Amino acid sequence: MEGLEDGGDLQQIRTTPPPVGRVITIPYADLLREDLDLSRELEAGFGLNSLGIVAISGVPKYSELRSRLLPLASRIAALSEESKKSLEDPASRFSFGWSHGKEMLKSGQPDIYKGSFYANPVVDVPTTEEILIERYPSYCRPNLWPREDLPELEPAFKELGHLILDVGLLLAHHCDKFVSARKSDYEQGKLVRMLQSSKCHKGRLLHYFPASSRDAEEREKEMASWCGWHFDHGSLTGLTCAMYMREVARVPNPDPQSGLYIRDRLGSIVKAVFAEEDIAYQMGEATEIHSGGLFRATLHCVQAACGETAVGVDRNTFALFMQPQWDEPLISPDSTEVIACALESLELSSALCSLNSSCLMMLTGFICIVPAVTEVCQLWRFYRGTSQQVLWRFMNQA
């Protein structure tokens, strides 16, 4: 889903307001036209010098479903500790059900500022094969729903998740067309095929707890204060615009500098802005590999709201990580060699490719041993701008 990277410096942002990057927007009606050429929009939104994000406007029923689900993030966070404990799934590394304080901040302290509820909105039981459940617990274990304490969560979560997936598949069709026109050996309709058949999609309902006066002051010291710098490792990530609440009432964003920040290909930090009624889709590293680098994932983080106006205000949002199936190979269209199995680049497993904390990666005909699974996408970022010879020397020295 995500991979953490080093953070940035908030003080620079606070003293000099960052540039605002308006996200490239495609009308839903255009997305429905399968033969329409959207290459200009896709190049601007996902291409080499892009922010790696595109928004879709005018999606029917989206506003209603968003308004139903996001307030429930506050309600699940307000459940009794006993109820939330029953929704935890340590065996999945807290990647199903409720998770709070399980992630670590850059400082090494547990992240208590936000809580997450994870579920697969497409299928409740991805597989019954024990070997797969043991190997990929973060993706293959069953969903946990608070059917007694918060029965409305399950249908709201699934309906919005399904909608974001369906719109993402329409976008994936146009992405497939874009790559096919430029890569002759690209499998026709590959991204759509992978995402339609995958049972690895993961929804994350996030609740950022209200700040105290001290919290608001502390957040001014760190830019990536709500979510650290990272690339998304999947294919596409669907995002809602955040909803801010004071108790049960919806309120405007209390700090115009809070929100999503993206580091572009030149190293500049840009505040990415899209409309409240739009669904945003961020490019993931799996699609970057599958497209042979035509599409690019970008580093991004979330800046917390700061100042007195942020005190007592919570933030709710939802992300759908659209991901390949666990056995889908990552193949660059410029080469027939398998880079890695898709889920092996996503799932930190104790047994990878039967090689004790290692995985096999084939690059331009060479078989290389990668020390850790999360390094697959990092090595791809290194590879895409490095000669084969330099990479081979690097891997032999690792």
Image: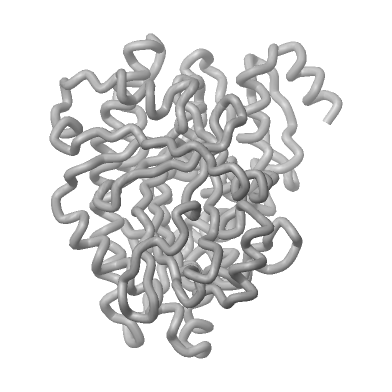
Q: Is residue 356 left or right of residue 74?
A: right
Q: Is residue 334 left or right of residue 135?
A: left
Q: In which quadrant of the rendered image does the C terminus lie? A: top right
Question: In the rendered view, would you say 249 is above or below 26?
Answer: below
Residue under the image location 58 percent in, 32 percent down? 268
Instruction: Count all numbered tags in the image, as a single digit.
Output: 0
Q: Position of residue 142 (x, y in %)?
A: 43, 66
- Quarter of the image for residue 123 reads bottom left
Residue under the image location 44 percent in, 41 percent down? 272
Q: Residue furthest right?
A: 397
Question: In the rendered view, would you say 180 is above or below 23?
Answer: above
Q: Is residue 213 left or right of residue 270?
A: right
Q: Position of residue 106 (x, y in %)?
A: 71, 56
Q: Is residue 323 visible?
A: yes
Decide which of 138, 55 is in the foreground and name it.
55
Q: Position of residue 174 (x, y in %)?
A: 27, 26
Residue under the image location 30 percent in, 71 percent down? 154
Decide which of 157, 395 is in the foreground and name it.
157
Q: Is residue 122 left or right of residue 5?
A: left
- Quarter of the image for residue 189 reads top left
Q: Residue furthest front?
A: 15
Q: Is residue 119 visible?
A: no
Q: Position of residue 293 (x, y in %)?
A: 50, 21
Residue under the image location 40 percent in, 12 percent down? 183
